[in-house]
Amino acid sequence: MISIYEVLETNDMIEKENLDVRTITLGISLLECIDSDLGRLNEKIYNRITTVAKDLVPTGKAIEKEFGIPVVNKRISVTPVSLLGAAACKTPEDFVTIAQTLDNAAKAAGVNFIGGYSALVSKGMTWSDELMIRSIPKALATTNYVCSSVNLGSTKTGLNMDAVKLMGGIVLDTAKETADRDSIGCAKLVVFCNAPDDNPFMAGAFHGVTEADAVINVGVSGPGVMRKALESVHGTDFGTLCEKVKKTAFKITRVGQLVAREASKRMNIPFGIIDLSLAPTPAVGDSIADIFEEMGLERAGAPGTTAALALLNDQVKKGGVMASSYVGGLSGAFIPVSEDQGMINAVEDGALSLEKLEAMTCVCSVGLDMIAIPGDTKPSTISGIIADEMAIGMVNQKTTAARLIPVIGKGVGETVEFGGLLGHAPVMPVNQFDCSSFINRGGRIPAPIHSFKN
């Protein structure tokens, strides 16, 4: 039985500490839509999405109203588009039509985002993969809801350095295509190593080929709750601190489990996973950096920050696993700069650099996330930053990602304003020493020795 104390405690988390269900993401397989005729393919995609997702937004709103739990976003993820378009698409422009179909379907369904404009090229690229990747800048510039991702490597296959090199240019081209909007297209584009098939968070969500026809995945977030909880163990030892993080993560995950099960039942679609990721927002008090400060660091980026993040990430996952048998996706702590006011303050105060953020990604949930860099950064430099981040994921057998935003026309120290959940960010300096000869080698960096586990 749930005690009245626990009910009141959860209400306080929601009302005073920004606890929310960040997203209900409906994953939809579009494999049945594959057709060699581009027009028929687009028609099938639109009909499939609008049919399966017709009740998603009303269901989310009904659960929100009935249980009093904020459900901030309703999203859709689909089968990676490079697979869907292989038979029909002969040019990058053909793939752009699929992006526009996804955009129209998302608008009709009333969702906030649709993910899956994606390619999985960890070992090599097919002709279809490359066409789709080259279409990304135009696709993101001409749509409003579409999010794109590319998986460039894995612990089992190594790093596809040809794709890493290509993506450096694609990121910059995407920035240029949306230069009139502070290069916001790059905020909807992420590259991965070890991308999970069941991630409900954008921009990296896609419906993996190992998934069922349709599935409900839920992402829960509560950095404000975690920071508030840690106030009660201020100055205690690490054992006590860890227990508090774990128990708080348990409570947060149970809220997500309730929403996920309810959405699954009402829509008659299987429940997939709960992703417990402490994803911040620009709202005051909803910050990962604030948690670090509550742990005893003057600013995020101070010596000890990586250790604090490692502790936080591990205990969050342990608490989540106790609360649900189906914890998946990314699960841990996000450290996006633009979406976290505490992280922005740390950058502006000189406590946090790109190199420190890279070190933190060894133990965080994702990686270099929502980081604004100068618009004149060379494509090879962007590829080098991506390669470093992918290598961390490959060697450490974890998911890593990079969402870099070269802001055209802006330099170090200037600020870019994205608005809403995406927030704002100071443009951060990047290392100016050249890496082009390294990136231009091409080929594949082999998988690490510990990948051989068969």
Image: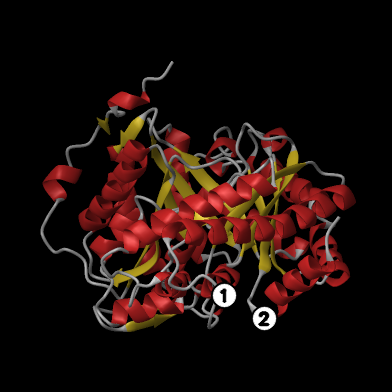
Q: Amino acid at mark 1?
A: Lys
Q: How many marks?
A: 2
- Identify which residue is drawn at 55% across, 49% down: 317
Q: Are marks 2 and 1 in contact (CB under 8 Å)?
A: yes
Q: In this rendering, is residue 61 above or below 409?
A: above
Q: Nearer the viewer, mark 2 or mark 1?
A: 1
- Identify which residue is drawn at 67% across, 81% down: 16
Residue 214 in view in this figure: yes
Q: Which residue is mark 2?
A: 16
- The mark that comes first in sequence, 2 or 1, is 2
Q: Residue 68 versus residue 210: which sits nearer the camera? A: 68
Horizontal side of 183 relative to 286 (left or right) equals left
Q: Residue 262 versus residue 28: which sits nearer the camera? A: 262
Image position, residue 358 (x, y; %): 30, 57
Image position, residue 304 (x, y; %): 30, 63
- Helix or strand or loop: what does disc 2 sit on? helix
Q: Residue 374 versus residue 331: which sits nearer the camera? A: 331
Within-10-Å neighbours for mark 2: few <14, some 14–19, many 20+: few
Image position, residue 194 (x, y; %): 44, 39
Residue 136 in view in this figure: no
Within-10-Å neighbours for mark 1: few <14, some 14–19, many 20+: some
Residue 375 lies in quadrant: bottom left
Q: Amino acid at mark 2?
A: Lys
In the rendered image, which quarter contains the N terminus? bottom right
In the rendered image, which quarter contains the C terminus? top left
Q: Which residue is mark 1?
A: 228
The structure's colour scheme is: secondary structure
Residue 58 lies in quadrant: bottom right
Horizontal side of 375 relative to 345 (left or right) equals left
- Identify which residue is drawn at 57% across, 64% down: 143
- Identify which residue is drawn at 69% across, 46% down: 324
- Helix or strand or loop: what does disc 1 sit on? helix
